[in-house]
Amino acid sequence: MNFQQLRSVREAARRGFNLTEVAIHLHTSQPGVSRQIRELEEELGVEIFVRAGKRLTGLTPPGEAMLATVERLLQEADNLRRVGDEFKASERGRLTVAATHSQARYVLPQVVHDFRLHYPQVSLHLHQGSPRQVAEMLCSGEADIGVATEALASYEQLVTLACYRWSHSIIVPPGHALLAEPGPVTLQALARHPIITYDLGYTGRAHIDKAFARAGLSPDVVLTAMDADVIKTYVELGMGVGVIASIAFDAERDRHLQALDARHLFEINLTRLALRRGAWLRDYVYSFIESFVPTLTPQVVRDAMAEPWIEARA
């Protein structure tokens, strides 16, 4: 049994049993992948995959039972390499952070700036994606840290830590009718206007939809986008009223727009930081996390990594 055999099994399961894609990912040949899998099956005395001719079509019951162990063995092998790297060069290495646009654009810049000052020899990579993509990058090992509002807490493979709470704001052009509303804006008043907001699954969109549903209202959502900058652009063009994260509005930068507080309309949102369960974290990873959220000290993170998985609720 060797790690190349285990990697072939893991990637076959991850990539829909397409051995061509597995071979490309592992920088080898398709016959080589097939041979690695077959040799492991012969050594274990069971078939790991269901076959239709020469094609793999699924996992057998023994294969399903083994996959979690394969994942764990490969992760521990990766941890061993990381431990070695830690002692060889404690302030050198690579850190990959996956985040949604709102986090990457409005929350993380100062953290990234400070981290680069303290760890100039660490290669820092920032990937953007949907909350689901952030979670998948963490689960696959492509990212070390994930930051998003939605989705992260539902993955058993991830450890999630609460970061901060935030609310939404309504943005409109100067002179808009909502600015003349007496008192705080109501959902009924907001629903009378075309709305531009986030795509489903992004930046608290679920809380927006739930609020209208509870009130028995069907808002006219005319445009959705993944990030606030796009939403603000179309609000400036007069296409509708924007609903965005409050952190995405800057009165000085967004001089052509005005913001109205919406915290009384929609539930408060929780941004979470996520890590792959069981991963070995370099010292500079702990430093990045603590710089982002000072209450998330290395000991707090280690304690969280040691706890069993319980699905969090917003």
Image (spheres, rainbow, N blue to C red):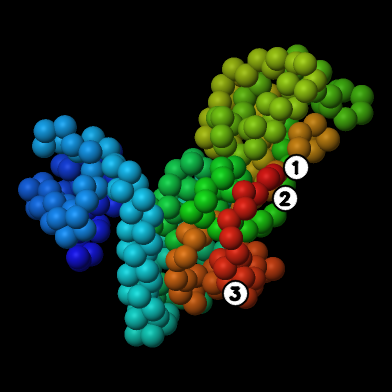
Q: Measuring 31% from the left and 48% from the top, which residue is drawn there?
A: 62
Rendered position, 282 above or below 204: below
Query: In front here: 259 or 212?
Result: 212
Label 3's element?
Answer: helix
Q: Measuring 54% from the left and 72% from the top, which residue is drawn there?
A: 286
Rendered position, 273 above or below 150: below
Query: In front here: 77 or 233?
Result: 77
Task: Please tell me the numbered disc located at residue 153.
Answer: none
Q: Are marks 2 and 1 in contact (CB under 8 Å)?
A: yes
Mark 2, other Cα within 10 Å: few <14 / some 14–19 / many ≥20: few
* Position of the N terminus by quadrant: bottom left
Task: Please tell me the numbered disc located at residue 268.
Answer: 1
Residue hosting label 3: 298
Q: Measuring 38% from the left and 85% from the top, which residue is drawn there?
A: 87
* Position of the C terminus by quadrant: top right
x and y percent of residue 40 in the render? Answer: 18, 57
Residue hosting label 2: 165
Query: In front here: 65 or 105?
Result: 65
Q: Are marks 2 and 3 in contact (CB under 8 Å)?
A: no
Q: Measuring 43% from the left and 47% from the top, which residue is drawn there?
A: 136
Mark 2 vs 1, N-terminal side: 2
Mark 3, other Cα within 10 Å: few <14 / some 14–19 / many ≥20: some
Q: Kindly give the residue lying farthest to the front in the view shown.
A: 45
- Distance (Cα) linking label 2 and label 3: 21 Å
Label 3 is placed on what type of residue? Answer: Pro
Mark 1 vs 3, N-terminal side: 1
- Distance (Cα) linking label 2 and label 1: 6 Å
Mark 1, other Cα within 10 Å: few <14 / some 14–19 / many ≥20: some
Disc 2 vs disc 3: which is toward the camera? 3
x and y percent of residue 84 in the render? Answer: 34, 81
Label 2 is placed on what type of residue? Answer: Arg
Label 1's element?
Answer: loop
